[in-house]
Image: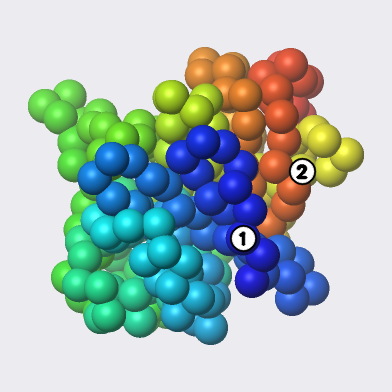
C-alpha cells in the first residue's frame, strides 16, 4: 500500500491492481477519521496506518459501492467506531435494493452498521469530524464529497476521474446518471479547492481553473 501525505492533515492510501483503489486518513487534534475503506483486503492495512496517526474516531463513506466499503466490516469490528454515509445509500449498502443500473442487490454490510450523516433542520448535511460533506449524486444516489477547509482539499471519491492533470467524467459503466454526476461537479466551482483528491485516478490541483469546461460536457 502506498502511503502519501497530500496536505497538512490528510494522508491518501493507495493500492494498484490494474487501477488505483484509495482511502484517506484525516487528522485533527482529537484523532483520526477514515474516509472510505477500499477493497476487502485493504481493511487491515488502512486500520494499521490510521492507528499510527492517533485515536480513530469514525469512518465516513463517500458512497456504498463495494470498492469503497470492502474493508469496512473488518475496521468496524476491530476499532468499534461509528460509520456514516448519506441516508440515500443505506438501502443499497444493506442489500435491500440493487444500486441503480444494477440488476442484483449486494449485501455489503450488516444492517445498522452504517448511520446516516447528520443533517440540520433544512435537511442539509452538517459538518462532521472537521470536514464539510456535500451531496453530489449521479455516480450513486447518495454520493458525498468531503471538504477540508483548512487544507483546501476536496476528497472527491468517485465524483471524478482524471487525465493529464484535468478532471474527467466518472467511469460510465458504474455511473447510472452521468448528467447528474457532471452537474454535481459544480461543487468545485463553488469551493475552489486547491486539490481534488480522487479514488481511482491521480489528484488534480487547481481544478477550478477548468471546471467550466468540465461542466459543459454531456
Numbered circle sitting on residue 3: 1
Q: In the rendered image, is residue 105 in sight?
A: no
Whether residues under marks 2 and 1 lie with C-beta atoms below 8 angstroms apart, the answer is no
Q: Relative to residue 142, is residue 169 drawn left or right? A: right
Instruction: Tell which of 97 and 77 is nearer to you.
Output: 77
Residue denoted by label 2? 162
Look at the image and tell me in which quarter the C terminus lies: top right
Q: For the residues carrying marks 2 and 1, which lies nearer the camera in this image? A: 1
Numbered circle sitting on residue 146: none
Q: Relative to 104, is 185 above or below? A: above
Residue 107, percent across and down? 36, 81
Q: Relative to residue 176, is residue 165 drawn left or right? A: right
Residue shown at 59% from the left, 47% from the top: 5
Q: Relative to 8, is 21 above or below? A: below
Q: Relative to 51, is 193 above or below? A: above
Residue that sits furthest to the left in the current view: 121
Element type at mark 2 = strand
Residue shown at 58% from the left, 18% from the top: 192
Decide: few, some or many residues near mark 2? Use Cα within 10 Å; few <14, some 14-19, many ≥20.
Answer: some
Amino acid at each position: 500500500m502506498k502511503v502519501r501525505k497530500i496536505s497538512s492533515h490528510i494522508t491518501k492510501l493507495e493500492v494498484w491492481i490494474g487501477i488505483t483503489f484509495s482511502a484517506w486518513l484525516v487528522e485533527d487534534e482529537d484523532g483520526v477519521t477514515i474516509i472510505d475503506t477500499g477493497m476487502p483486503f485493504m481493511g487491515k492495512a488502512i486500520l494499521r496506518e490510521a492507528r499510527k496517526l492517533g485515536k480513530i474516531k469514525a469512518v465516513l463513506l463517500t458512497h456504498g459501492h463495494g470498492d469503497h466499503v470492502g474493508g469496512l466490516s473488518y475496521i468496524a469490528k476491530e476499532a468499534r467506531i461509528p460509520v456514516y454515509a448519506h441516508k440515500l445509500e443505506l438501502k443499497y449498502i444493506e442489500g435491500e435494493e440493487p444500486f441503480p443500473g444494477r440488476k442484483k442487490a449486494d449485501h455489503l454490510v450488516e444492517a445498522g452498521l452504517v448511520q446516516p450523516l447528520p443533517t440540520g433542520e433544512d435537511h442539509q448535511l452538517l459538518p462532521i469530524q472537521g470536514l464539510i460533506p456535500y451531496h453530489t449524486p449521479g455516480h450513486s444516489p447518495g454520493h458525498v464529497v468531503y471538504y477540508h477547509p483548512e487544507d483546501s482539499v476536496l476528497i472527491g471519491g468517485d465524483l471524478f476521474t482524471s487525465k493529464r492533470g484535468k478532471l474527467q467524467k466518472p467511469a460510465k459503466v458504474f455511473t447510472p446518471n452521468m448528467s447528474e454526476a457532471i452537474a454535481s461537479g459544480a461543487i468545485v466551482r463553488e469551493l475552489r479547492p486547491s486539490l481534488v483528491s480522487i479514488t481511482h485516478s491521480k489528484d488534480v490541483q487547481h481544478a477550478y481553473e477548468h471546471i467550466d469546461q468540465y461542466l459543459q460536457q454531456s
